[in-house]
Image (spheres, helix red, strand yellow):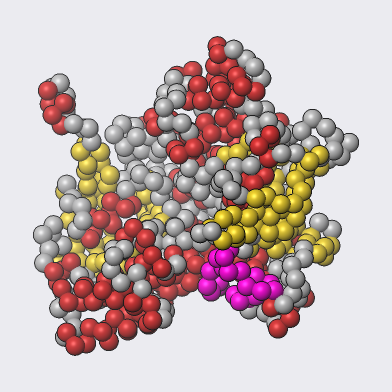
Amino acid sequence: MTFLEVRDLTVKFRVGSALVARLKGEPVPDLVAVDGLSFAVGRGESIGIVGESGCGKSTLAKAITGLEPPASGSIWLDGRELTQRRDRATRRRTQMVFQDPSSSLNPSLTVEKTLSELLRVHRLVPKDEIDDRCGQLMDLVDLPRALLSSRPRSLSGGQRQRVGIARALALEPEVLIADEAVAALDVSVQAPILNLLNQLRDELGLTVMFISHDLAVVRYVSDRVIVMYLGKAVEDRPAADLFDDPRHPYTKALMAAAPKFGVKKAPGESALKGEPPSALDLPSGCRFRPRCPIAQDICAEAEPDLTGPSKTPRAACHFAWEGPGNSG
Amino acid sequence: MSNRILEVSDLSVTLQRAGKPITPVEGVSLTVDRGEALGIAGESGCDKTLTLKSIIGLLPPGAVVGGDLRFALDRDEPVAYEPAEVHGHGISMISQEPMTALNPTMRVGDLIAEGPMVHAGLDRSAARERAVELMRMVGIPTPERRARMWPHQLSGGLRQRVMIATALSTEPKLILCDEPTTALDVSIQDQILGLLQDIRTRLDMSIIFVSHDLAVLGELCDRIAIMYAGQVVEAGPVDELFADPRHPYAEALMHSVPSFAETSEELEGIEGRPPDPGSFPEGCRFAPRCDYARDDCRIASFELVSIGPGRETACIHPELIGGRQR
């Protein structure tokens, strides 16, 4: 059952000066951060979005939460379109946990104030129950209630991120989007936060979208993974299949490049040479072509569609489903 | 001829904080052989970077360094040295964020040329040629054109390559790397790690690589030292240490790393956080967070003891650990 659906979503940013371009008689340059992305997520599903910086994964999150207006395409939640203008009750349904809890929490507010303000503004609980609810939220994210009176400054990184999660959960969302939520944390702190996200998803039936550059982390929390490259999805597969048998050459190369704990490999042997081209100056045909080890003539002519044998195993490569796959 | 290039024994760093002395680094002993890569791992706040900086004297004013530092620059045997003398003369450092480490008001070619001018006494034009050569060596495409660019015009990966070229420009024997790939994408990280590996074998250089990422250390390093609260708590060859940690902190760190291969096992993490240097606990500093801690751990004095060829641990109960290998 489709719960959250993104249809042909495109998000553009204007770069440089439109005035200068117009005076010179040149077209105004647009950076296409998300380029015609479509996918559907079932209720309670956990989807991972992986890619390198600049691939549009954070822009996607912002478009879904309404923080960034799409240039075209639409976002649907439970059969209704999420338009750019959303009322309070709609905004509540999609919440985000940000990367850096020390800059996304208001430093002058105590944890209690941060949480209670949300509850008050959104009128989620009667006034006299706000204190109770704050305590329950702290229990939910495994923080001692005594920390309600502290300010972010006196909390550790892991505790701050738990407050960030509690803040998102305060609004009783249906979709929780975690954008690099553990990237700033030590592994020792990251592990319990990942466990917490898994546990919350089971307990509250949340639909989770987990955005990260770290493949191992994504594998740990996701049922399904979408790999993005320069604004497009290049592969969309159930997590276990993707990691055991990647089909797109970019996914293969990314996995070969990632250091793996407990697996001996030499660095620098990934097929991924050079850096991604600028999103302002995309190559013809397949956008991965200039870095692709198996590129052929057809790759310069036609951009491959994201297709596959059925709805979720999909890959955007002309040669993705030819012959048996091999692990990267 | 001895193969040893650096010997650090009983290193301590004392700083003044709010008028009170604190000792964030204490009793650290490390050795590095020629051509060897030593990794230093630990959570943030374990003062890995401070340890690294004290080797080349990049410490804040008022810092007092204790212990014995020996480095073999021109000689066969490591001899005692002044930290300020070796910076740029035998030892170079690469830091995490090249954008803040590179002078933004200098073209990258001139930045790299400073080393050959000061160190080898080349004149400006010869030094510039050398800079372009170094840029080519670290894999910067079109180095002649890039040498005239400013640091802000380069991507993160290229900036880190410029950092490496700058570090190499003084022809060091040892490079200290402080999380040089943490800010980079995986594909670029892989390229930079490959470059460091290549340089190391080609120039027979030694590396000390500080990182919180055990997977990265596993790729590059021969030996690894795990730091906790300003002390080295375990050291050994990287494969052996990963397969069979002999300190509860090393073991706990490894059980926190998400694995590529399996998903069934739950990650464990470590409760709490490293202690503040102003209030280190008595006895074993890891004891308050340790699952195996016994009463005698809280009074044990710190000592890194040998437990096999090349293996050392500071845990007084290493026999309790194990049976929980990944």
Left or right of A204, for residue B229: right
- What quarter of the picture does the N terminus of chain B occupy? top right
* Residue A111 visible in this rendered orientation of the protein: yes
Left or right of B229, for residue A158: left
Q: Within the magenta stretch, is there residue B276?
A: yes
Left or right of A2, for residue B116: right
Q: Within the magenta stretch, is there residue B235?
A: no
Q: Quadrant of residue A285?
A: top left
Measuring from the top left, give residue A35's x and y in whole percent. Answer: 26, 45
- Identified at 64% across, 31% down, the residue is B88
Measuring from the top left, give residue A289's x and y in whole percent. Answer: 41, 35
Q: Which residues are magenta?
A: B264-290
Measuring from the top left, give residue B203's x and y in whole percent. Answer: 71, 31
Q: Mainly helix, strand or loop, the magenta region?
A: loop
- Identified at 57% across, 34% down, the residue is B164
Left or right of A145, for residue B54: right
- Identified at 20% across, 70% down, the residue is A92
Observer-nearest residue: A184 or A236?
Answer: A184
